[in-house]
Image (tube, helix red, strand yellow):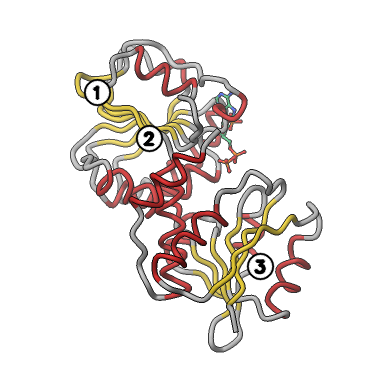
Amino acid sequence: MTDQYAVIGNPIAQSKSPEIHRAFAQQTGQDMNYTKLLAPIDQFKEEVKKFFSSGGKGLNITVPFKLQAWQLAQVRSDRAELAGSANTLLVGREGRLYADNTDGIGLARDILRNQQGTVTGKKILILGAGGAVRGVLSNLLAEKPKQLVIANRTLSKATQLADLFSKKNPIRAIGYDQLTRQQFDWVINGTAASLQNELPPLPGGILRANAWCYDMMYGAQDTVFMQWAKEQGAAKVMDGLGMLVEQAAEAFFIWRHVRPQTQPVIEQIRGQLV
Ligand code: ATR
């Protein structure tokens, strides 16, 4: 029987996950079906239960349910534990709900493997202090940057996040107004600003020569952050489509124990963006 998978969120119409997983399934010859599920805002738990009790094999979780998915799980991977949110669910052999988070590995694979970038020994600025940023911090820190600075409008949120990871890592929090007179090798935008066509309040002159800029959002056109990065002379400017496909590939591997090739799927989805 064909195995059932889905992505659950609210809204969900915009999700590219079905196209990505269908392409992976076709490429690897896996007998699976992957759909979109719109959960009412207050019905996430019920929808998850319904899905698994009717034989569903695995779920991806998107906005705004990643925290609830993490809370609902009976077992969590170490990386989900650190991320404080979950984007992948499955029911284990013993019938317990298992949560993972593949966003951080998705970003790391896109930066390190697809883009051939280096984070080790570099000074990184990450913008935002919400769930998206928390989800990727441990993977970035594992690459041993020289320093990781989190900037956020609400400084207290950045400070809380930095405190979570600061025991073993060179990480600190600042407000945007403290950014002048500093320069970075990397600027990674993990805010939701691009969704509203907005740019975080960044001063000019914060990019080192050869700096790379990455927006975790993506679209057919450059985001405002990407436009800013080009104007500031960044050596390379990337969007988050590669991260999206890589996080999906890791979820696919967790469910099917097969690693799909991501490059052709990144190109396919890029070609379909409008
Ligand atoms: P997510 O789970 O996508 O990270 P979130 O937890 O709501 O969503 O976090 C959104 C992040 O984007 C926050 O860091 C938010 O800043 P505040 O904590 O100060 O609210 C940031 N953000 C959203 N819109 C922004 C904008 N226009 N400029 C700068 N930061 C913005």
Asked if ligand 1 lies within 8 A of label 3, the reply is no
Name which residue lies at 44% across and 71% down. Answer: 254
Q: Nearer the viewer, mark 3 or mark 1?
A: 1
State the mark number for residue 72. Answer: 3
Q: Nearer the viewer, mark 2 or mark 1?
A: 1
Tell me if mark 2 has few (under 14), some (14-19) or many (20+) residues whose alpha carbon lies within 10 angstroms of its own: some
Q: Would you say the residues marked 3 and 2 are in contact, meaning their CB atoms lie under 8 Å apart?
A: no
Q: Secondary structure at mark 1?
A: loop
Task: Name the residue tied to disc 1.
Answer: 235
Outermost residue, bottom side: 94
Task: Name the amino acid, label 3.
Answer: Leu
Q: Secondary structure at mark 2?
A: strand
Task: Name the amino acid, label 1.
Answer: Ala
State which tag comes first along the sequence, 3 or 1.
3
State the mark number for residue 172. Answer: 2
Q: CA distance from mark 2 to mark 1?
A: 25 Å
Left or right of 37: which side holds 241? left
